[in-house]
Image (cartoon, grey):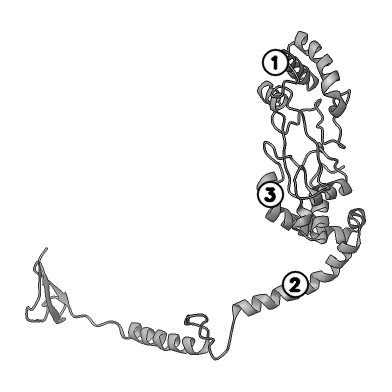
Amino acid sequence: MANVAGHDAHRDPVSGVDTTGHEWDGIRELDNPLPRWWLWVFYACILWSVGYWIVMPAWPLVSSYTKGVLGYSQREILIEEIATAKAGQAQWLDRIKASSVEEIRADPQLREFAMAGGRSAFAVNCSQCHGQGAAGSKGYPNLNDDAWLWGGSPEQILHTITHGIRNADDPDARWSEMPKFGKDGLLTPVQVRDVVEHVLALSGQEADAGRAAAGATVFAEQCAACHGENAKGNTELGAPNLTDSIWLYGGDRAAVTESVNNARFGIMPAWGLKLDETTLKQLAVYVHALGGGQ
């Protein structure tokens, strides 16, 4: 496409408008001026912008910005709003700090406030492992059911959140360690297979009856001390109930075999070293109320 410039302007015979003198492949450009209303709006916007620069914060500087005649600052307004909100919350936070978890739960208004704070704290600190809805995943317990490794009462939940599980940071952390029966040679491969079949049978799964019977003896000798003679678990030791269908690391034959052979060693941080007492109590109230608290 050729652009031919420098041609003399002339009046277009069809529209009666002068051309600019520019021509593209025989097509001439009409010299139509912009509408007056458009020009006035454009000029008004220029004036408005100049006025805005003078009145409002507008231009960035090296380490600050132009403050404007009005000195308006969204940041300062936000700081004031946060301070006002915190002042309104102070009386409730003070009451939570001075109350036990049970006392908080017994007061409907205080409980509602604690639930809101606990939900927010859970989303920030706990959802990364337990999930946004606290449904958990492999290795991270579901907090909506009624299976609690370390107890599901409000005070037990508070203790677990505060001190964590098997961490080296808090001397009061929950602690237990399952032996690596296969890896450390505490059980022979045959005994491992037998006790796995017994555990599968305990939870109502399909299992080899002969091996399960032999595994019952192994279980009584090696596993009952923690999981209990009836395999219902022990919250004092964090030993899970093996008779239900709730499995932290999976309940099929391969997963149970892996657990028996190599054990599991889940770790939870001691949130008492990172969060204040009031937030910990709010978390305990919230977690307990998810549906599975005892």
Residue drawn at x 59%, y 84% as measured from the top left: 72
The vertical placement of 31 against 157, above or below, is below
Nearer to us of marks 2 and 1 is 1
- Label 2 vs label 1: CA separation? 62 Å
- Could you say which quadrant of the image residue 252 lies in? top right
List the residue tagged with mark 2.
85
**What amino acid is labelled 1 in the image?**
Pro
Q: Nearer the viewer, residue 77 or 180?
A: 180
**Element type at marker 2?**
helix
Residue 86 drawn at (x, y percent):
76, 71
User: Relative to residue 78, is residue 164 drawn left or right?
Assistant: right
**What amino acid is labelled 2 in the image?**
Ala
Q: Residues within 10 Å of mark 2 (few under 14, many from 20)?
A: few
Nearer to us of marks 3 and 2 is 3
Residue drawn at x 47%, y 89% as measured from the top left: 51
Mark number displayed over residue 127: 3
Nearer to us of marks 3 and 1 is 1
Q: Residues within 10 Å of mark 3 (few under 14, many from 20)?
A: some
The vertical placement of 275 against 194, above or below, is below
**Element type at marker 1?**
helix
Badge 3 vs badge 1, beta-carbon distance below 8 Å: no
- Label 3 vs label 2: CA separation? 25 Å
User: Relative to residue 213, is residue 4 drawn left or right?
Assistant: left
Mark number displayed over residue 189: 1
Q: Nearer the viewer, residue 252 or 70?
A: 252
The tag earlier along the polypeptide, 2 or 1, is 2
Residue drawn at x 18%, y 80% as measured from the top left: 31
Q: Nearer the viewer, residue 160 or 106?
A: 160
